[in-house]
Amino acid sequence: MSFVSKFLLLGACAGLSQFASAQTAAPLQQSFPNKSIRLIAPSSAGGPVDVIARIVAQGWSEVLAQQIVIDNRAGAAGMIGAELVARSAPDGYTLLLGFSGPLVIVPQINVSTPYDTLKDFAPISLVATAPYVLLVHPGVAAKSVKELVALAKAQPGKLNFASGGTGVGIHMAGELFNLAAGVKITHVPYKGAGPGMTALLAGEVDMMFNGLSPALPHIKTGKLRALAVGGDRRSPLVPELPTISESGFQFNTSGWYGVLAPKNTPRPVVAKMHGTLVTALNIPHVKERLAEIAVEVEGTTPEEFSRHLREEMATWAKVVQAAGLKGKQVN
């Protein structure tokens, strides 16, 4: 066979291969899903992750015309649920509603995290963000972020802050604040954000970062004083509150939530899940229900979500190192 004949034959084979791949991908995308999907929420029932998962799942089920079942897998700062998805079959029927703790913070702290966030998952989309709010007990003599920083510098080691446990997002927000403001406010971990808020209300601790939704009732009654929100823009729910960065500190962090599949999930499946998820996030009743709990819709492409994960990894690696948290036990 001549060189030209071989070249033409190879070209024909390549063309047939691409055609076959396209023919396989099209039916796969059209037929998926043909049974219910399990969305793992790596938290206990009733918490913010669970509530967001159920709101998103309801709208997504409508778009897919297929049931999405929420499976709560709490424990080990979210690692149990995240590992379950990382080890699941890459067929699109087991997904993760992930958040900062198990995806980008815990892997920086826990030296034996049983998965690699950047290698073991296929990001689909960010779905929502929730602003953190900086709260102080009314007994603390600070009515602004600058006054709080001045107080912390004048009395080194005296102030403390509550969190829902080592390695959770609101803990790391406190450590990031220490780093950004050049202060040392002592961390006091509790077994959940709820007990941490109870301690703050009782005056057992001085301050705390928490989600805006659970904090709003206490802000309105004056039981807690809100100094600022932690994201890159003011919240429409409390437009009078400045951001921490407006006070002159390099601080920008919020709670965020996104959907991921196991690695090697077929691209047509990821594409379909992405398209239908973004459609679901724009359903009016989904946006309204999320807004009621102070959560904003945040749909992205898989590539944008992947970039977000890498950027968050880099941010929290610096904070973990500065706070000396490497190797600490997470809960």
Image (spheres, rainbow, N blue to C red):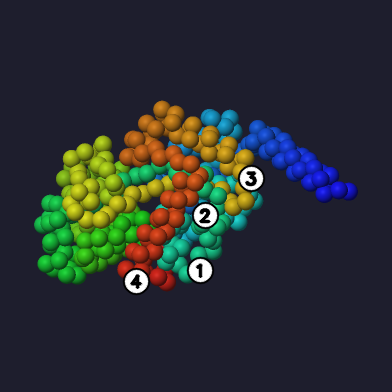
- Mark 4 and 1 residues: CB-CB less than 8 Å, in contact? no
Q: Which residue is mark 1?
A: 112
Q: Comparing marks 3 and 4, which lies closer to the viewer?
A: 3
- The residue identified by callout 2 is 81
Residue 74 rendering spot, x and y as whole percentages: 48, 54
Q: Secondary structure at mark 1?
A: loop
User: Which residue is identified by label 4?
Assistant: 324
Q: Earlier in the sequence, mark 1 or mark 2?
A: 2
Question: Which amino acid, mark 3?
Answer: Pro
> Which circle's residue, 3 or 4, is located before the other in the chain?
3
Label 4: how many Cα within 10 Å (few below 14, some 14–19, many 20+): few
Residue 160 vertical placement versus 18 (above, below)? below
Q: Which one is earlier in the sequence, the residue at label 4 or at label 2?
A: 2
What amino acid type is highlighted by mark number 4?
A: Gly
Residue indicated by mark 3:
266
Of residues 64 and 182, the one drawn nearer to the viewer in this rendering? 182
Residue under the point 29% across and 47% down: 231
Is there a contact, CB below 8 Å, between mark 1 and mark 2? no
In terms of depth relative to the viewer, which is nearer, 307 or 69? 307
Q: Nearer the viewer, residue 99 or 234?
A: 234
Q: Are marks 4 and 2 in contact (CB under 8 Å)?
A: no
Mark 4 → mark 2, Cα distance in angstroms: 26 Å
Q: Secondary structure at mark 4?
A: loop
